Each structure stands twice: as structure tokens, then as C-alpha cells.
Image (spheres, grey):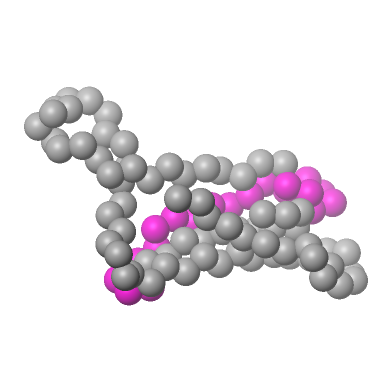
Amino acid sequence: MHDYGRRLVLENVTREETIATLDSSLDPQGRILSMPIKTLLTPPAPHKNAGKAQPEGYKLDRGKLVRVTATYENTTGHSLPEGAMGIVVG
């Protein structure tokens, strides 16, 4: 995300599910102060780690349609032609 970025949403369009919604923290000028990170791991089999904290998991099968949406709020009053981008790495 770049400055003025408010939210990043990852959706499984095939299953009509939201995988992750990440809201940024901005300073009064719209610069990003922080952006949460969500790590999606396939959880281990329950019997192997009974009673232990489990990582969050999300199974995504080949051929499924996934959408990334980045929401920006440009408060400058002028166009920022190279000022918006959203990316999910995995």
C-alpha cells in the first residue's frame, strides 16, 4: 500500500468468502503509519498439537478466483497517477 491507503481486502470470489480485511493506521496527512500483517498457514493436524495455539489457516485450491481490493482516500485534492497499489504476497 501507498500513502492514503485505508484498507486491503483479500476475497475468495469462488466461495464468496472474505479471507482477510486489513485496515491501515494513517497520520493526519494520510501517510501510512502501520499496516497489519496476516499470515495464513495451513494448520497442522489437530492431534499433533492438542492444547497448543494453532496458526490461522486458509485452504486455497488451484483454480479458485481470488480478488485483492485496495481502498484509498486521497485527501490532497489533486490526482495521484502513481499513488495507489495493493498487493498480497503468498
Q: Pinpoint residue 50: horizontal percent, then vertical percent.
A: 14, 28
Q: Is residue 46 visible?
A: yes
Q: Is residue 60 left or right of residue 73?
A: left
Q: Residue placed at 27% from the left, 34% from the top?
A: 54
| 3 relative to 46, above or below | below
Q: Residue furthest front?
A: 62
Q: Is residue 16 visible?
A: no
Reply yes or no: does residue 4 show up in magenta: no
Q: Quadrant of residue 72?
A: bottom right
Reply yes or no: does residue 17 show up in magenta: yes
Q: Is residue 1 left or right of residue 62?
A: right
Q: Residue placed at 63% from the left, 49% from the top?
A: 24
Query: The magenta stretch spans which residues?
Result: 13-32
Q: Residue placed at 21% from the left, 37% from the top?
A: 44
Q: Quadrant of residue 6?
A: bottom right
Q: Pinpoint residue 71: horizontal percent, then vertical percent.
A: 64, 65
The quarter in which the N terminus is drawn is bottom right
Q: Pinpoint residue 36: horizontal percent, then vertical percent.
A: 56, 43
Q: Is residue 31 left or right of residue 10?
A: right
Q: Quadrant of residue 56?
A: top left
| 14 relative to 82, above or below | below
Q: Residue placed at 28% from the left, 54% from the top?
A: 59
| 34 relative to 83, above or below | above
| 7 relative to 17, above or below | above
Q: Pinpoint residue 26: horizontal percent, then vertical percent.
A: 73, 48
Number of marks present in the image shown: 0
Q: Is residue 7 left or right of residue 28?
A: left
Q: Residue furthest left?
A: 47
